[in-house]
Amino acid sequence: MKVLIIVPAFNEAIIIKSVLESIIKENPEWDILVINDGSSDATGEIASELKTVKVINLPCNLGIGGAVETGFKYALYHNYDLAVQFDGDGQHKASEIKKILEPLIVQKADVVIGSRFLLKSTNWKPNFSRRLGIKIFSLVNSILIRQKITDNTSGFRAYNKRAIEFLARDNYPTDYPEPEAIILLGKNGFKMMEVFVEMQERAEGKSSISGLKQLYYMFKVLLSILVSSIRAPQIKKINKQSNFSLY
């Protein structure tokens, strides 16, 4: 099976090389695609130094949603069977990739989400407001799609070809992509499951969302989730004659 690891990265010059090397060490047969999301540092140049890594340099910062959707479009165009979304900031462990791919390989799910909350994690300790927000997102999403998802904001996910195709066809949300994507996938009949993964705090820098911003972020995400649940698009049929080409 052809597997693509999609690594969105924005100003991760300090850590990106070690992140990519950890993936290569885990399985050199996986293809790796770095989406350099308009970085102002040397993220793209450093990633390009690794000969087996493909890099797409976006001309401006599209945000995580636009970067990941670019990865899905690439995966669809190049006919990948499976794709893994893997953050470029060092929070995810390459040793966990096989774990989230396994349910897809045996066809138990269309999408697998790496969850920090199925078991007790020793490496990832969010503050109270972030824990509260994640629990609220989980409750709301679980009600809306009638499927319990414990970690709606996890950016460590794996997708089969059917899910890749759906998300590549301009269905991937751009504002708050992780929780919104769960709504869109659930409303369109995709089977999702979670596996426990260990995560760690980002290796360099810090989140731009902290303090009172977290409460404001929580409100905006909840509003976005509700809007997504109302207008969840149906799967777009593929026109085989259409001109679908980015690369």
Image: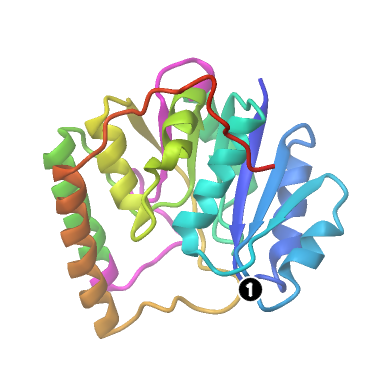
Q: Nearer the viewer, residue 156 or 116?
A: 156
Q: Nearer the viewer, residue 127 or 37?
A: 37
Give left or right: position of 177 versus 42: left
How far across and down, in percent of the image, does residue 128 sit? 25, 72
How far across and down, in percent of the image, does residue 201 sit? 51, 67
Residue 123 showing in the rendered view: no
What residue sits 21% from the left and 67% below the top?
220
Amino acid of disc 1: Asn
Give left or right: position of 69 versus 235: right
Query: In the picture, residue 5 is in which quadrant?
Result: top right
Q: Quadrant of the C terminus?
A: top right
Query: In the picture, residue 241 is in which quadrant?
Result: top right
What residue sits 67% from the left and 78% below the top?
40
Magenta segment, which residues? Answer: 104-130
Q: Confirm whether the magenta stretch covers residue 119.
A: yes
Q: Quadrant of the N terminus?
A: top right
Q: Nearer the viewer, residue 193 or 59?
A: 59
How far across and down, in percent of the image, does residue 44 sit? 74, 64
Q: Confirm whether the magenta stretch covers residue 127.
A: yes
Q: Is residue 105 above or below residue 69?
A: above
